Image: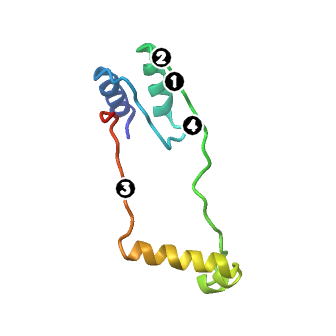
């Protein structure tokens, strides 16, 4: 995203005067984050920043998945199969709340 586009987006965010604005999973080293912070300060918003862990991942160093999987405990393999089965069955839900319900 260009800096001009980022500035326009930031301006649009605060023009609407939201009571609460939550932005998640942003890289603090990206320039857009500092623009949002500056705009929030200028608009007299309190800023709360929290560092969270990055998404977990497993490096398997080119080994076949089955070989990696065999090194896991039987309980962990069983849980992974159960979770995969539930995903394939479509038993996943996503709830989105915009804050208007009380």
Front disc: 4 or 2: 2
Which residue is located at x 33 percent, y 27 percent?
13
Q: Which mark is residue 23?
A: none
Quadrant that contains the C terminus: top left
Front-lying residue, 86 or 17: 86
Front-lying residue, 50 or 19: 19
* Mark found first going from the N terminus, 3 or 2: 2
Left or right position of 75 against 43: right
Q: Where does label 2 land, which residue? A: 41
Instruction: Using the numbered discs, state the Cα–Cα distance from disc 1 to disc 2 in whole angstroms.
Output: 8 Å
Above or below, comparing residue 2 to residue 88 in the picture: above
Q: Secondary structure at mark 1?
A: loop
Place residue 52 in its image quadrant.
top right
Q: Where does label 1 land, which residue? A: 47
Which residue is located at x 53 percent, y 41 percent?
27
Place residue 40 in its image quadrant.
top left
Q: Where does label 3 land, which residue? A: 94
Label 1 neighbourhood size at 10 Å, few (<14), some (14-19), many (20+)? Answer: few
Instruction: Using the numbered discs, state the Cα–Cα distance from disc 4 to disc 3 in whole angstroms.
Output: 29 Å
Q: Where does label 4 land, which residue? A: 29
């Amino acid at each position: 995203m260009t800096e001009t586009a980022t500035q326009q987006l930031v301006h649009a965010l605060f023009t609407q005067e939201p009571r609460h604005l939550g932005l998640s999973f942003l890289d603090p080293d990206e320039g857009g984050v500092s623009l949002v912070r500056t705009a929030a300060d200028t608009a007299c918003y309190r800023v709360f920043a929290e560092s969270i862990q990055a998404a977990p991942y497993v490096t398997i160093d080119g080994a076949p998945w089955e070989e990696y999987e065999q090194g896991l405990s039987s309980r962990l393999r069983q849980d992974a199969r159960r979770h995969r089965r539930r995903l394939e069955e479509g038993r996943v839900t996503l709830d989105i709340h915009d804050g208007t319900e009380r």
